[in-house]
């Protein structure tokens, strides 16, 4: 079930955290995985090497999703090299936490450039070949914060809420071509981004989760894999919450 044999999948932000776990799961299901990284080349190369040694198919590419020209070039090269692109997981993201009164314009602009425009530019480039093939899967990574909000994260929440609107709109635009567009909204997940939250603050966050634990990148990756599969062929415009009941 959820087999992806012969599929070509591009995962942005794939060198660590949720992206890394997603790349592993998609590769384990048989996909040829392109691990896109912005700056963590060593981590991306190590991941690809481990996948290859396990008999999987993987490669790494440098990609800053905020660079539109680079996005178009990289995705064009992937399609040319493999003949298609079946799956896009738009996972790359940045977060700068600050109360709105203290949020700097440049920090907000950077989050918008990566989290929103970057994801949209990747999707725009990916759907060109998907529309010709009349099939494809696009999955955006949003966040529980984009739905419920959180003090000190107004800027980040704005970008993640925007992706929900993008998901629902794009699903309507490309559904007739057999392309599904969905989002996964993780809750509090144990990644580099949340590693600094420790002690009493971490305990307080965990108390908000009915399942009583922090999520793992693998929890999210499994949900992404489902949405990328043939079994999810009649699911589109959906936001799948992976938050332990937090929201």
Image: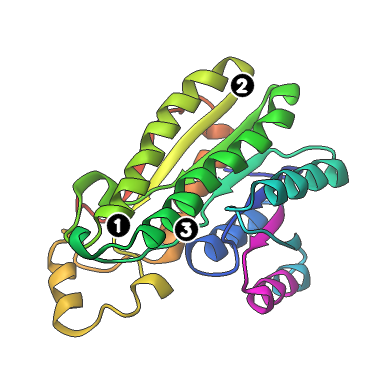
What is the magenta range?
33-49
- Circle 2 is placed at which residue position? 178
Q: Earlier in the sequence, mark 1 or mark 3?
A: 3
- Packing grade of label 2 (10 A; few <14, some 14-19, many >=20) is some
Residue positioned most to the front: 105
In the picture, measured across the screen, residue 30 lies left or right of residue 12, that is right
In contact (CB < 8 Å): disc 2 and disc 3: no
Question: Quick one: quadrant of the N terminus?
Answer: top right
Above or below, 95 against 50 in this view is above
Q: Is residue 144 visible?
A: no
- Circle 1 is placed at which residue position? 187
In the picture, measured across the screen, residue 185 lies left or right of residue 166, that is left
Q: Residue 122 at x, y = what percent?
A: 61, 43
Give the quarter of the image for residue 216: bottom left
Q: Residue 241 at x, y = what percent?
A: 32, 46
Q: Residue 96 at x, y = what percent?
A: 35, 65
In the picture, measured across the screen, residue 135 lies left or right of residue 190, that is right
């Amino acid at each position: 079930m959820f087999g992806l044999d012969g599929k070509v999948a591009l995962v942005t932000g794939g060198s660590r955290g949720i992206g890394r776990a997603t790349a592993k799961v998609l590769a384990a299901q048989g996909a040829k995985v392109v691990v896109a990284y912005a700056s963590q080349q060593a981590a991306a190369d190590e991941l690809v090497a481990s996948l290859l040694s396990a008999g999987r198919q993987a490669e790494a590419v440098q990609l800053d999703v905020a660079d539109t020209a680079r996005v178009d070039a990289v995705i064009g090269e992937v399609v040319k090299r493999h003949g298609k692109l079946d799956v896009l997981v738009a996972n790359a993201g940045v977060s700068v936490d600050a109360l709105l009164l203290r949020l700097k314009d440049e920090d907000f602009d950077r989050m918008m450039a990566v989290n929103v425009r970057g994801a949209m530019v990747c999707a725009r480039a990916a759907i060109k070949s998907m529309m010709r093939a009349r099939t494809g899967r696009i999955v955006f990574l949003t966040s529980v914060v984009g739905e419920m909000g959180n003090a000190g994260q107004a800027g980040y929440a704005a970008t993640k809420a925007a992706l929900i609107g993008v998901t629902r709109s794009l699903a309507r635009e490309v559904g007739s071509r057999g392309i599904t567009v969905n989002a996964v909204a993780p809750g509090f997940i144990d990644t580099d981004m949340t590693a600094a939250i420790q002690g009493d603050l971490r305990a307080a966050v965990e108390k908000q989760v009915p399942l009583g634990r922090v999520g793992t990148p693998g929890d999210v990756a499994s949900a992404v894999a489902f949405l990328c599969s043939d079994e999810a062929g009649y699911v589109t415009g959906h936001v799948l919450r992976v938050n332990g009941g937090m929201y």
